[in-house]
Image (cartoon, helix red, strand yellow):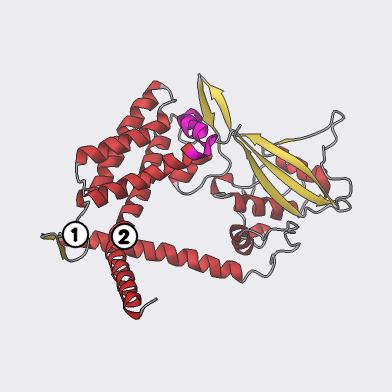
Amino acid sequence: MPKEALKRTVRKAFIALLAFLRYLPRLIRICLGVFLCLNLAAWAVLTLFPKPDAAIASANSLMFAALLLLLPALLYGAMFLALPIAFDIRGIRSLRAHVAVWTVLVGLWCIAAPTPTQLAGVGIGAASGLVYWLLAGRLAGQPDLGRGGGVVLHPGDRLLTALFVVAAIVLTGQWAVGKVRASMFDGDPGTPAYVWTYRREMPNSLKLTLMDYPDAASCPVLEGADMPEGLPPPLDWPRVHSHSVAKVCVFRPLQATEGLEAAAAWFEAQGFRVSREEGGQIRTYGHRNSPEIRFDAGRRLRSEQNGAFVYSPLILPKLPLARLFSHMAYGMSFNIYYPVEGNRPLRVETSSSTL
């Protein structure tokens, strides 16, 4: 490549980088604004349900149907971010346009729900659009820092952009710290250790959970709960916020049980159904030459009451949006793996039923 052509290419790349860096604060504001409004909408949907500790699963029926078709689901999810960015690039600051888009997208969550929930979905979508317009939409096409296009941003808007940027830096830092901690993982610090036998590498989320919950005492349990004699206390399920915590904090207490029957009794005392043969023996699974066997314990998460589905969750994600998506599961199972000759579990896996 000629020297002059190389210089022009480098100059263009440098100008493009400067343009991106100039746009980055606004992009962060848009992305985090969408994230906040989605969680606000999810919180509102969950709050409108009739019981404080239950939710109508039919409010998510359209999301459930969309997930059966991967491409429509991806397009639907991408529109929540693609449309606000497109509005910003085109400089569309109309309150009516933003409210209309959010009303349609959020309203789709509730379109298959009973009529009151449908109407509530329209209101929640409109409110989310209003909040997003206040956070970012009304500034579409305008600079977030300094002067541009003859416009000087209000100091309050500059401060809000700075807060969004700081929040993005904090979130990125937390993600990076988690990556570093996971890279330093040198096996389960608990005794006995969680046994990982798969060819793929252990997920980072499980590595971090094993380090954060090294024994049963560190897990969220209900001390003093009414349990059959000799069994460990049950888990405090509302404080279990992820599948990784569920795996580890089921695995830890089960180390205090002797054999499959005691482990099955621990599950059954918490409302789980353990798969059993006709004679009452625990049904186990395993390949002919496998050194492991497993038994399964499951529980239904939703039931029909008065024509609506009532959701009784086991795992409660902290973010409202994640909690709303978790309502698509109608059942949850634990798969407990044991050595063929041994009374202590090797590991615990989870699965959810959505079909």
Q: Is residue 76 above or below residue 146?
A: above
Question: Where are the magenta residues, as a range?
Answer: 57-71
Q: Which residue is mark 1?
A: 156
The residue closer to the viewer here, 6 or 297, is: 6
Identify which amino acid the numbered label 1 is placed on.
Gly
Q: Is residue 345 above or below residue 95?
A: below
User: Dot 2, crowdedness within 10 Å: few (<14), some or many (≥20)?
Assistant: many
Position of residue 146 measured from the top left corner of the image (x, y, whole percent): 17, 66
User: Dot 1, crowdedness within 10 Å: few (<14), some or many (≥20)?
Assistant: few
How many circles with numbers are drawn on the protein? 2
Whether residues under marks 1 and 2 lie with C-beta atoms below 8 angstroms apart, the answer is: no
Q: CA distance from mark 1 to mark 2?
A: 12 Å
Q: Residue furthest left?
A: 150
Q: Is residue 272 left or right of residue 13?
A: right
Is residue 162 rendered magenta in the image? no
Q: Is residue 136 visible?
A: no
Q: Which residue is mark 2?
A: 164
Q: Is residue 219 left or right of residue 139?
A: right
Position of residue 218 measured from the top left corner of the image (x, y, whole percent): 62, 59
Please identify the dominant SS of the magenta region.
helix
Q: Which mark is residue 59?
A: none
Identify which amino acid the numbered label 2 is placed on.
Phe
Per the image, label 2 sits on a secondary structure element best described as helix
